[in-house]
Amino acid sequence: MTSNGKILVIGSGFAGFWAALAAKRFAGDRVDVTLLSPEPVLQIRPRLYEARPETLGVDLLPLLAKVAVDFARGEAAGLDPEAKTVRLAHGAQLSYDRLIVATGSRMRRPPVPGAETSYSVDTQAEAIAFDTRLAEIALKGTVPTIAVVGAGFTGIELVLELRDRLLFHGGTEAAERARIVLIDRADVVGPELGPGPRPVIEEALGEARVELRLGAQISELSANRVSFADGSSLAVDAVALATGMAAAPFAAQLPGERDHLGRILVAASLRAPEAPEIFVAGDAAAADTGDGHRALQSCQHAGQLGRVAGENAARDLLGEACLPYKQLRYLTCLDLGRSGAVVTQGWDRRIDKTGAEAKAMKRFINTQLIYPPIDGSAETLLDGSSTDTMDRAGRLKEQAA
Ligand SMILES: Cc1cc2nc3c(=O)[nH]c(=O)nc-3n(C[C@H](O)[C@H](O)[C@H](O)COP(=O)(O)OP(=O)(O)OC[C@H]3O[C@@H](n4cnc5c(N)ncnc54)[C@H](O)[C@@H]3O)c2cc1C
């Protein structure tokens, strides 16, 4: 069968991977689909606060080969929507008939001296570098102090994992005695999580003996010191940043309006407003979930945005009407280390589960739900590209029962 055109997907995260598969599922041999990324790896970013970050990437080449999606290695550096070409950082150029921008997000480092060289767990490489430092600290033989800046989702999950991570590296004494400090300029922990789950989070932080330094403005960071705007400072063995995310730089190449996180404001079809051949998905897209809420920069939304963007790019190329993106169910599941986890339902984040029950759900999400079916057939992979995240959860649980 002759191809009706080329779909190029930029980014091999949750959005880009599922977009490529959804395009292929809908159009089969009628379109050529290429996934462009610096490495053919799906980084399991939601788990990068955990131990063994070197294991938290999925090799996509065997999966893409099963469904006849091509892989192009490279970093997109420029875009010409008129000519329908993408320029790569190493100089080559790729053309497309429909483009899906799924370039994700990057942590926003605070604008203070030293922030550029502080640790983080934003990418697999950064998480590995932090883990290497933790391994050194664990065996140093002194009582360590580790600071985490940012008391949002990632900062909370990270501080509550640190004692066990020191233990994992053989630092029994360090794990027991470490001083762990969580810093935020906000006056409360988890400011964006709202008041619902806060008491449970505060209790877990207390049980883990995490010191809170809230309402604190940092002014400078170095390898061994955090300085504050009030003139005080804290000597540390390591400081890791968890200061929130914004769209990765490539999104700035697209024409059109963006939100305060640099995401492109897309239509319900996920089409870029000023570039009709371009669709945007995942952390690069500011999309309405269909009920007046804005999709978050989350894995939960990225996968589903990718599935819809991929199918719509294929539909559009084949002259069929696009579908509206809708994602009405929303839950959060926050790992609380030795205190279990907390699950909330809905945008007002009503507590649904805590303790061991919530922890079992977190394990299911982190070890099954967010992974593609690695050993699955082409049919299973393509089938997953049509499924809503929550439906997938239901199916996986049925299979396990
Ligand atoms: C520590 C941590 C914990 C998290 N916890 C949770 C959680 O519990 N629940 C949850 O729902 N979400 C969580 N998230 C957020 C979640 O990981 C992201 O929302 C999700 O990864 C977004 O998927 P994405 O595909 O849009 O982007 P990404 O995963 O960021 O993938 C983007 C892809 O694009 C590629 N790329 C970027 N720029 C270019 C370019 N110029 N050219 C080519 N390729 C490019 C990247 O290499 C990458 O392959 C967490 C994130 C972190 C860092």
Image (cartoon, rainbow, N blue to C red):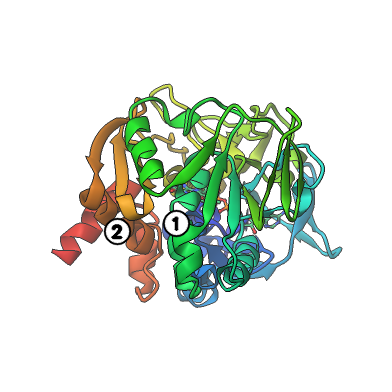
The label nearer to you, 2 versus 1, is 1
Tell me: 160 left or right of 106. left
Q: Quadrant of residue 92?
A: bottom right
Q: Position of residue 67 (x, y in %)?
A: 46, 70
- Report the disc number at residue 238: none
Q: Position of residue 12 (x, y in %)?
A: 58, 60
* Camera-nearest residue between 188 and 49: 188
Q: Identify which residue is drawn at 38% across, 72% down.
A: 378
Q: Which residue is mark 1?
A: 161
Q: Is residue 117 visible?
A: yes
Rounded to the nearest angstrom, the CA distance separating label 2 from label 1 is 18 Å
Q: Secondary structure at mark 1?
A: loop
Q: Identify which residue is drawn at 45% across, 49% down.
A: 157
Q: Identify which residue is drawn at 51% across, 46% down.
A: 154
Q: Earlier in the sequence, mark 2 or mark 1?
A: 1
- Amino acid type, label 1: Glu
The answer to whether the residue labelled 2 contacts the one labelled 1, judged by CB atoms less than 8 Å apart, is no
Q: Quadrant of residue 95?
A: bottom right
- Report the disc number at residue 364: 2
Q: Residue furthest front?
A: 142
Q: Identify which residue is drawn at 44% across, 61% down.
A: 176
Q: Does the Cβ of the disc 1 residue fall within 8 Å of ligand 1?
A: no
Tell me: 28 left or right of 399. right
* Camera-nearest residue between 366 and 223: 223
Q: Position of residue 252 (x, y in %)?
A: 75, 39
